[in-house]
Image (cartoon, helix red, strand yellow):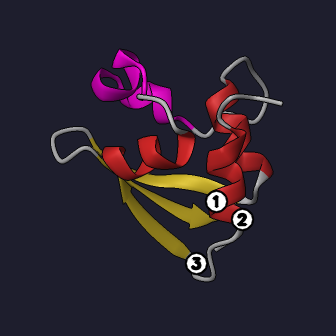
């Protein structure tokens, strides 16, 4: 189990097609702070299916993808895959 799996579980339980979460909300779901790279690099939020980024596997495996990231506002928009 990945330490980011709680985020995937949270997203899987959301009823809509899109969910906007700020970093504090994501950290509350995860119960730990996001790493510095999540705050600095949009690539940390890439929708990577094959690769080593366990955080991406958490939301992709749950049927979601990152649809937008605003590092200044510290906000991520997730969208259901295929929508």
Q: Position of residue 43 (x, y in %)?
A: 45, 26
Q: Is residue 61 magenta?
A: no
Instruction: Tell me: 1 left or right of 36.
Output: right
Point out the residue furthest to the bottom here.
15
Quadrant in which residue 51 is drawn:
top right
Circle 2 SS class: helix
Q: Dot 3 surroundings within 10 Å: few (below 14), some, or many (20 or more)?
A: few
- Residue at x-position 75% and y-position 29%: 2
Residue at which label 3 appears? 17
Q: Main secondary structure of the magenta part?
A: helix
The x, y position of residue 82, in whole percent, is 71, 69
Q: Which mark is residue 10?
A: 1
* Residue at x 73% of width, y 37% of height: 57
Circles 1 and 3, Cβ within 8 Å, touching? The answer is: no
Distance, label 3 to label 2, CA atoms, is 11 Å
Where are the magenta residues, as a range? 34-46
Q: Which residue is nearer to you in this view: 33 or 14?
A: 33
Q: Are marks 1 and 2 in contact (CB under 8 Å)?
A: yes
Residues under numbered marks 3 and 2 in contact, where contact means CB atoms less than 8 Å apart? no
Direction from residue 56 to residue 72 in the image, left or right = left
Q: Quadrant of the C terminus?
A: bottom right
Q: Which residue is mark 2?
A: 12
**Residue 19 as seen in the image, left or right of residue 54:** left
Q: What SS does tag 3 mark?
A: loop
| Image height of 71 relative to 82, above or below | above
């Amino acid at each position: 189990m990945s330490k980011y799996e709680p985020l995937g579980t949270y997203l899987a339980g959301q009823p809509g097609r899109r969910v906007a979460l700020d970093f504090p909300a994501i950290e509350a779901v995860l119960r730990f702070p996001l790493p510095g790279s999540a705050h600095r690099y949009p690539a940390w939020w890439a929708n990577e299916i094959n690769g080593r980024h366990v955080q991406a596997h958490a939301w992709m495996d749950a049927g979601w993808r990152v649809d937008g990231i605003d590092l200044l506002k510290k906000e991520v928009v997730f969208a259901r895959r295929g929508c």
